[in-house]
Image: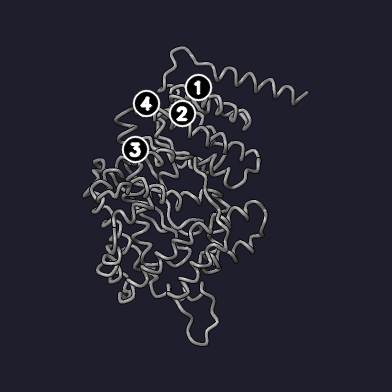
Amino acid sequence: MRRACLGILALALASCATVPQPGETLDSLAQDYVVLQLAIGEKEDGYIDAYYGPDELRERSVAELSAKDLPQLEILAAALRKRIDRYADDGVQGTSMDERRARFLVAQLTAAHTRLRMMQGEQIPFVQEAEGLFGVTPETPALESFDPVLARIERLVPAAEGSSAPLWKRLDDYYARFYIPEDRLQAVFDASIAECKRRTLEHIAMPEGESFTLRFVTDKPWSGYNYYQGGYASKIEVNTDLPIRLDRAVDLGCHEGYPGHHAFNALLEKNLVNDRGWTEFSIYPLYSPQSLIAEGSANYGIPLAFPGEEQVRFETGVLAPLAGLPTEDLAEYAALRDALKDLGPARYTIAAEYLAGKMSGEEAIELLQRYQLVSPERAAQSLRFIDTYRSYIINYGLGRDMVRAWIERGDADATTRWKRMERLLSEPSLPSDLLAE
């Protein structure tokens, strides 16, 4: 009887929710979207990464949806997606800003629907989870396919005569010479972020009054995080649980700051929320296609801002002296970290097998050590991230590669690359857009 009643309720909710309402517009549907996302956020900590929209939408969410349970919210998400889809020109053909806006909302609601299924305990395989949440299909290559990469790195860091230390240990010892002393972190990061900002501002105009604060924190599953506050302001946090290598200052300065997350959020707020009145961009659900654009562009922003050997030159001339670190081996170190990027997709395979219950946590840590070439402590932190964020990990490497291919298509010069980057950060962009010319 209870199941039958729930089924009748579901049909009633779906029927009411899918019928266009009198006077309904894309703006009013966008407000419904925000209200729904806020309600989902009340059910899961961390689901909403940022919200700086109107207080009345938050109040409306509480008044209208706080009593809804997860199955009811799932029905509402599917129904709202259907109502918006009619603005999207069948979801694929539209190229106007309004049609792109509608397609963005449809994709975000597809992700919300997927996440609601997961929140109710549904087990979705890794690749299908990534498709539902982020709108892409990651590959999970066989781990042995990365053995040639390991062999290449082995040649870069050969074992000392008589040593039996594994490759990850040799790398860990090698990295130790580039750890930034804790008392130099502030100065090094301040200089790095300032340079990332300077290089970005040469190509992209940021909103007037934009700013950020920087804090060093501990006990986090991530190495850095940007908490966007609205009003063109960010709070950037850097995790110091493990020693921080010199190159991470530029990496995090670009990724979390300029032209990464801070620039992305500030440009969306200015161009879409403030200039166009598109309130849906005042909310950022973490588990959504928006994250592939965010993480991919943030990671691509590093070589965009520091092409070729410019990062090594900046580290050699500015950051290493500030940190009190040697400079003679930085070029060799840069070649090594470039080689390590080819191991990135191995993490997807390990995560997929681990999350499917096909290996234990201990086995996953061992494989992360072998195929990511990290210490047991860093492997454990990586597994903690996988436990927390699951298939989100694909956004960093796959997202970067997709953004790079789209921005650099046609052998674009530096000026064109920056213009395309600004466009990507300022429009309702989806992963599927990166596959279009």
**Residue mark closest to the camera, 3 vs 1:** 1
Which numbered disc, 2 or 1, marks the residue that appears first in the sequence? 1
Spot the residue most to the left: 202
Secondary element under disc 2, as helix, strand or loop, is helix
Precedes in sequence: disc 3 or disc 2: 2
- For label 3, the SS is helix
> Distance of mark 1 from mark 4, alpha carbons?
15 Å
The secondary element bearing badge 4 is classed as helix
Q: Which residue is mark 3?
A: 268
Distance from the alpha carbon under mark 4 to that under mark 3: 15 Å
- Which corner quadrant of the image does residue 92 belong to? top left
* 4 and 3 marks in contact (CB < 8 Å): no
Between tags 4 and 3, which lies in front? 4
311 over 285 or under it: above or below = below
Q: Nearer the viewer, mark 2 or mark 1?
A: 2
9 or 227: nearer the eye?
Answer: 9
Q: Identity of the amino acid at label 3?
A: Leu
Task: Report the quarter where the N terminus lies.
Answer: top right
The residue labelled by disc 1 is 83
User: Can you see residue 58?
Assistant: no
Label 3–label 2 contact, CB within 8 A: no
Q: Amino acid at mark 1?
A: Arg
Please, which residue is most extreme toward the right here? 1
Disc 2 residue type?
Answer: Gly
- In the rendered image, which residue does mark 4 sit on? 98
Relative depth, front residue between 287 and 417: 417
Provide residue 384's location: percent of width, then percent of height.
56, 57
User: Considering only order in the chain, which callout, 3 or 4, is on the residue closer to the N terminus?
Assistant: 4
State yes or no: discs 3 and 1 in contact (Cβ < 8 Å). Answer: no
Q: Residue furthest top?
A: 22
Residue 91 is tagged as: 2
